[in-house]
Amino acid sequence: MTMADEEVREVPITSSKLVVRRLESDDREQIGRWDAFVSNCSNATFFHKAGWQKIVGEVFNHQTYFLYAERDKVIEGVLPLGHVNSFLFGKSLVSLPFAVYGGIAANTPEAVKRLEDEAQAIARELGVDQLELRNIEQRHPDWPTQNLYVSFRKELKPEVEANMLAIPRKQRAMVRKGIKNGLRSEIDETVDRFFSLYADNVHRHGTPAMPRRYFEALLKEFGKDCEVLTAVDAGGRPLSSVLSFYFRDEVLPYYAGDDLTARDQAANDFKYWELMRRACERGIRIFDYGRSKQGTGSYSFKKNWGFEPQPLFYEYCLYRRDTIPQNNPANAKYRLLIAAWRRMPISIANWLGPFIVRNLG
């Protein structure tokens, strides 16, 4: 063989195979790589963080399937799933239970396909009624889509006063009313004041409350990325509280509650303004007002703050049913149950609520 022959010889290149694996909840190395990917993936959200595996599994006792696709130890996509097996509402595989966002977060088309194929295989193996992917962007125009929910997101201005002036006039007047009333905001180290206001609030609306230990677990698991802000009056009495998540350059107020007198003192508007002000001062760029059902009071409230609704694409692959389930308070068949729940003593509601809410996801 001549030197020329050696120079033109081509060495075959073998492409590494993309493999789908399941995240082990006690594998710190896996968890670290998962969260590093989520932090840098453009279409990932706070609800793609690995910590949700422990929350969904340990607090609500749902089986979890946190899938990731990797090639040569490099993750290309993740899909967190929870199996909600409910006698009341049926069986579903959801990405992700108790989350407003979910679905696949990936940076290659192959990872998307492989993760979705594995999710459907698990769904068929479990015999669920449907696979539900809570996407921000539409992936399957041919799948049934739940169009009940929208999200509200807005970019913050770099100056505090500019954000105040960006609030529409009538709502801005409510914020200034709260300030004039001597309200102030405090960051809580525990969920004590928050849970009392939250549980009372959802009871007034006729819906079951999440268990207290769920909120305690959120604070413990997510640390500085989970924060409770409480608005108090001049005498220090808590009026309104919000539990928020921080992710990259975003803040997401997620759970909230208030006292009956909060509206009269403009405590709710003041609370969200204080969250916005604090976020601006720490360099947060996006204020995510979260999900609301169209036509509800919270939908109108967020619109009045100058936020525009953006559609959410909750897509379903149906296996053992023909229509999308409507397990939400907007469903007319739950009106009698909601009315009865409002009349129930709050101590009983707080005891019974976690047994019901875990089935909703």
Image: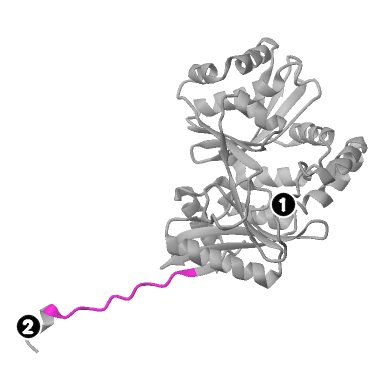
Q: Label 2's element?
A: helix
Q: Label 1's element?
A: loop
Q: Position of 72 compared to 160: left or right?
A: left
Where 303 sits versus 62, above or below? above
What secondary structure predominates along the stretch shown in magenta? loop
Which residue is the site of mark 2? 3
Neighbours of disc 2 within 10 Å: few (<14), some (14-19), many (20+): few
Q: Position of 29 compared to 229: left or right?
A: left
Image coordinates for residue 12, horizontal then vertical, percent = 26, 78
Q: Position of 134 compared to 69: left or right?
A: right
Measured Cα–Cα span from mark 1 to mark 2: 68 Å
Q: Residue 5 lies in what quarter of the image?
A: bottom left
Count the numbered circles shown. Answer: 2
Q: Is residue 188 visible?
A: no
Quarter of the image with the N terminus is bottom left
Image coordinates for residue 107, horizontal then vertical, percent = 43, 56
Name the front one of labels 1 and 2: 1
Residue type of the residue flagged with mark 2: Met
Where 1 sits versus 79, above or below? below
> Depth check: 27 or 107 in front?
107
Q: Which residues are magenta?
A: 8-19
Which residue is the site of mark 1? 361
In reply to whether residue 259 is colored magenta, the answer given is: no
In reply to whether residue 10 is colored magenta, the answer given is: yes
Residue type of the residue flagged with mark 1: Gly
For the point 88% across and 36% down, the residue is 342
Q: Residue 317 lies in what quarter of the image?
A: bottom right
For the point 49% across and 41% down, the residue is 248
